[in-house]
Image (tube, coloured by chain):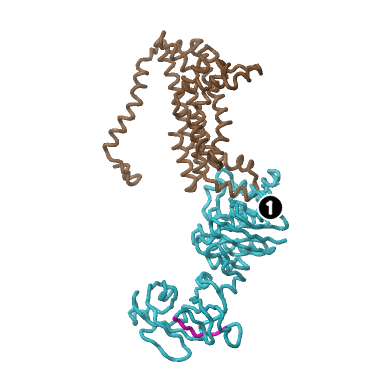
Chain colours: A brown, B cyan
Amino acid sequence: MKQAMNGGYGGVPRWIYVLAAAGGLFVVLPLAAMVAKVNWSQFIPLITSEASLQALGLSLRTSAASTVLCIVLGVPLALVLARGSFPGQRVLRSLVLLPLVLPPVVGGIALLYTFGRQGLLGRTLEVAGLQIAFSTTAVILAQTFVALPFLVVSLEGALRTAGNRYEAVAATLGAGPTTVLRRVTLPLVLPGLASGAVLSFARSLGEFGATLTFAGSLQGVTRTLPLEIYLQRETDADAAVALSLVLVAVAVAVVALAYRSPRAAERAPAHSGERTTTARAAGGAVR
Amino acid sequence: MTFSVQAAVAGRGFDVSLAVGPGETVAVMGANGAGKSTLLNVIAGLLHPDSGTAELDGRTLFDLTAGRGQWTAPHRRGTALLAQEPLLFPHLSVLDNVAFGPRSAGASKAAARETALRWLAEVEATELQSRRPAELSGGQAQRVAVARALAAEPGLLLLDEPMAALDIHAAPLLRRLLKRVLAGRRAIIITHDVLDALMLADRVVILENGRISEEGPTREVLRRPRSRFAAGLAGLNFVAGGITEHGLRAGVLNLYGQHHDVPGPLPAGQPGVAVFPPSAVSVFPSEAHGSPRNSFAVTITDLEPHGDGIRVRAGDGGQLSADITPAASADLGLAPGMEVYFVIKAGAVAIYPS
């Protein structure tokens, strides 16, 4: 009722709220169950053990690196997909999005046969003295592989909603393509880029299957936090739960950031066209 | 030092050739979908025509005649575009928006801002310099957009209905501003408003179905329209047909009139047009005789308020109109579907070759 008075007609039947509440509980309940299992007296020692700290540090470092890699590779991809027009564009889009639906283990195997010692590029790299499989680099590549689509999808959506009218005007004012990209396009889609980067980071942080397959589980080198949790679960359930809670905390912080960034960016644009851009960009983040 | 364009876009049935002299402002008018925006986009380099050439001050904008494929990128053309919406970059301050053109041309940040301030002063928006576009009203934003386009010092300024998105209070202000800044500047302005053409342009070009149907000095086109569209702009009734000894024949309709510009007999046998103001048309319930008058039966299609009076639309698709007083309308009991007689003094009908 209050909703109806404040924001006009809501249009949501009441029984929808019941189902929505069930949906919310489905997500929250398991988290609560996990929190209930935490051995609080041992919590600090458990998460500050050497193995735990190494895993957490490695996770944060590799996720940050793969996010940077996602931006470097994903921004051009999104630009080409949203603005370009060339044969095979639709095929390229489908292929780029493939890691979203591919089981991560399969991704790991694919990477192994590309960069592994016997792989497609691996042999050449080995001649050059580079060995990628089962190294920290492999962790970063595995994470980038699975996280890249998040950035591309998010940014491509933002680019499409922003349209190219500002860019056209900038060009007629004398700005070359690179200037337009730097001074108009990227600032306009910054909220979309930010939420895409945050999502990529979150996906990298949680990456397990591809990492295990392609990089293995070597403490301090390739054993990220999810791998450490899985390993601990077999020997020390309390440690696994404590570390899981840490991962949840980091994930919550990341999601909060993703939700906040579009709204923070709203201070700049205000006319109607811009509002849709930001709203859609936020929508992209939720996807 | 001229600008000329000749371009065809087959997919849109567009084929236009146009030249603009130095310091000349040309108004392009036409119905929606006539190809007005296509023309500007082709000139600005945002749309690739199928064939044609364009040249601005000795530089080739594009040359797509057979065997050649010269194409200058939009940012090297010097044809700044001002659209219906201001499209100020939302992430830049007003000052930096205006400084965008000079910056892109390679000026230092300080020099570009200095130029921007000069142009902001020109459009009387200096006090807005530190605001964000979101904090501007529609009229203010469009003024800043004018300054931004001018600051790029274009060889040809392209304006795509710059007043269309403004409310009735902001439009006159911008029109006055444009009159000042367009004086002595080469520009093409698309507009739906005959007032813009009169106030801002030296010449008007009428586009119909992707082709120029009429062009000439604004006053001349409005006084002696040769296309239905231009006659509509001038608020005149328009009948096209063949010139006879005493007037004009269009199907069954015979109009008596005179050639106002050239004394002597009418050039019979030529295709021509008859033009007369709705205020010269009287409405009678029955046929009126007397010389020299035109009288013919029409069926009323619509009645609409027009100024203090009533405009009676009648004939083929309501293409003829008569302006009468509300009292006369009431006396005659006019209603759509009624058959009445339109009576026009021959002296009020101007007939000339089309």
Left or right of residue B214, residue B252 in this image: left
Instruction: Relative to A269, say whether A246 is above or below.
Output: above
Instruction: Relative to B128, say whether A209 is above or below.
Output: above
x and y percentages locating residue A276 in the rendered image: 46, 44
Q: Residues within 10 Å of mark 1 (few under 14, many from 20)?
A: few
Residue at point 44%, 73% (across, down): B319
Label count reads 1
x and y percentages locating residue B28 in the rendered image: 57, 64
x and y percentages locating residue A186 in the rendered image: 57, 39
Say which quadrant the C terminus of chain B sits in: bottom right
Say which quadrant the N terminus of chain B sits in: bottom right
In this view, the residue in front, B286 or B172, is B286
Q: Is residue B37 magenta?
A: no
Question: Three-letter amino acid code at disc 1?
Answer: Arg
- Residue bounds of the magenta highlight: B252-259
* Image quadrant in which you'd find residue B91: top right
Q: Label 1 belongs to which residue?
A: B68
